[in-house]
Amino acid sequence: MRKGDSYTLVFAAIVCVACSLTLSVTSALLREKQEEQSELDRRLNIMKAFGVPIRDDSGRKLSVREVNRIFDEHIRDVVLDAATGLVIPDLRANDLSHADIASRARLPLYEWTEGGEPVKFAFPVSGKGLWSTIYGYMALDRDLNTILGVTFYRHGETPGLGGEISTDWFQAQFRGKKILDDGMLQPFEVLKGKVADRYPAGNEHAVDGISGATLTGKGINQFLNRDLQLYEKYFAQIRDN
């Protein structure tokens, strides 16, 4: 092999190795950044479900440091055994595997604390819409009956139709609604149409649907009521105490 050919091969090998290392480092940095953003989104949506303002009085969005400070000071997570409704000691939400989450054998629960005591409760809700899996959170006040808030933050529903579940006007309807009637869990419903048309006297267990998004609403009804039923085992024990 000629000297020039050897030099060319060595140079090409060095370039390939350098490019490979650069891509690996870039990929790792991007993955870390994506994970940080995913964790920030999770925290923001839990806080939003609890009714925590995510903007200050001037309209400025809370910084990452502020979000983390509020979350770490007030929110703690536990994991429930779905079969018994009991807290699993020494297990945290971030310890759950994808299999745990998918099977709902173990249920993450987020508690808003004041003076070290839990006074509000939030939990993830998810299930199939029309075109996608919808992910969100629901929070309940200390009476474990009144809804503080709901968020639907990740999905692939049709923009302008089912995609409206991400909007403030739709999510705001859930605030102040109830999950119980005479102490019993009641089916919650996203209606086809308006609450005022179906129930002129009002209904504490229903919200207006989205025009042209009936199947998205039906999907929410199915998974919201399923997840409420799962967590009710734990909530009932707290109410009894």
Image (cartoon, rainbow, N blue to C red):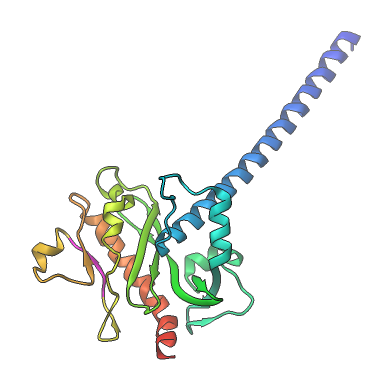
Question: How many numbered discs sit on the rendered protein?
Answer: 0
Dividing the picture into quadrants, the one containing residue 121 is bottom left
Q: Is residue 45 left or right of residue 23?
A: left
Give, as a single range, the part of the protein colored magenta: 187-191
Dividing the picture into quadrants, the one containing residue 197 is bottom left
Q: Is residue 238 magenta?
A: no
Q: Is residue 15 left or right of residue 237?
A: right
Percent coordinates x, y for residue 120 in the rendering: 44, 73
Along the viewing direction, whichever of 10 and 206 lies nearer the viewer: 206
Residue drawn at x 82%, y 18% is 11
Task: Please say whether residue 161 is visible from this viewpoint.
Answer: yes
Q: Main secondary structure of the magenta part?
A: loop
Residue at the limit of the structure toward the front, as seen here: 57
Residue drawn at x 61%, y 73% is 91
Along the viewing direction, whichever of 83 and 42 lies nearer the viewer: 42
Classify 212 as above or below 175: above
Q: Is residue 188 magenta?
A: yes
Percent coordinates x, y for residue 129 in the rendering: 32, 56
Dividing the picture into quadrants, the one containing residue 233 is bottom left
Classify 165 as above or below 120: above
Percent coordinates x, y for residue 40 in the rendering: 53, 52
Q: Which quadrant: the N terminus? A: top right
Task: Please say whether residue 125 is visible from this viewpoint.
Answer: no
